Amino acid sequence: MQEFSNKATELFKRNKNILLTIGAVVAVSALKIYFRGKTCKVNRDLTDKVIVITGGTSGIGRATVEVLAQKGCMVIIGARDANKAEQFINKIKSTNL
């Protein structure tokens, strides 16, 4: 067993850069797959459901509001900026979501 361990250590020392490069490529590939743009796959009818979204005028909250509005929800948006919220609500209403 000790002989195997010594050979493995020697192999690693000689090929350290190659192994680290392979590891980095595998890690980056895994992260790309994990963080690839996902979309909501729920096909459930959400008509007559009421959902409250905080931070609904930007980022993930905004995207969530748009998807839920398309699904037929009544969405209550919590936002710090009333003008920004009003503009977003008008946009949603004008696009018939």
Image: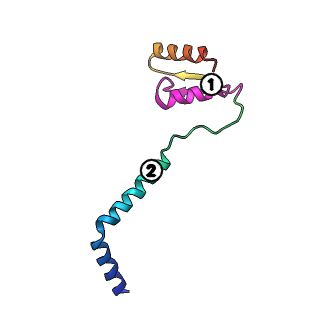
Residue plotted at (31% across, 73% down): 12
Kind of residue at disc 2: Leu
Badge 2: residue crowd in 10 Å (few <14, some 14–19, many ≥20): few
Tell me where residue 72 sits by quadrant.
top right
In the rendered image of this protein, does residue 38 appear above or below residue 92?
A: below
Instruction: Give percent across and percent down for residue 53.
Output: 55, 27
* Residue 23 horizontal side relative to residue 88, left or right: left
Residue at left 33%, top 62%? 20
On the image, which quarter does residue 80 sit in? top left
Residue 47, position as x, y percentages in the image: 71, 26
Give the colouring mode of the picture. Answer: rainbow
Q: Nearer the viewer, residue 15 or 41?
A: 15
Image disc number at residue 31: 2
Residue nearer the viewer, 4 or 54: 4
Task: Label 2: state its secondary structure.
Answer: helix
Q: Earlier in the sequence, mark 1 or mark 2?
A: 2
Can you identify the residue that label 1 sits on?
69
Quadrant of res 89: top right
Give the foreground label among 1 and 2: 2
Q: Which mark is residue 88?
A: none
What span is colored magenta in the figure? 47-73
Q: Hey, what amino acid is under mark 1?
A: Ala
- Magenta span includes 14: no
| Point 49% across, 48% down: residue | 34
Q: CA distance from mark 1 to mark 2?
A: 30 Å
> Is 68 part of what is drawn in magenta?
yes
Residue drawn at x 51%, y 25% is: 56
Tell me if mark 1 has few (under 14), some (14-19) or many (20+) residues whose alpha carbon lies within 10 angstroms of its own: some
Q: Position of residue 95 (x, y in %)?
A: 60, 17
- Please give the count of numbered marks on the rendered protein: 2
Q: Are marks 1 and 2 in contact (CB under 8 Å)?
A: no
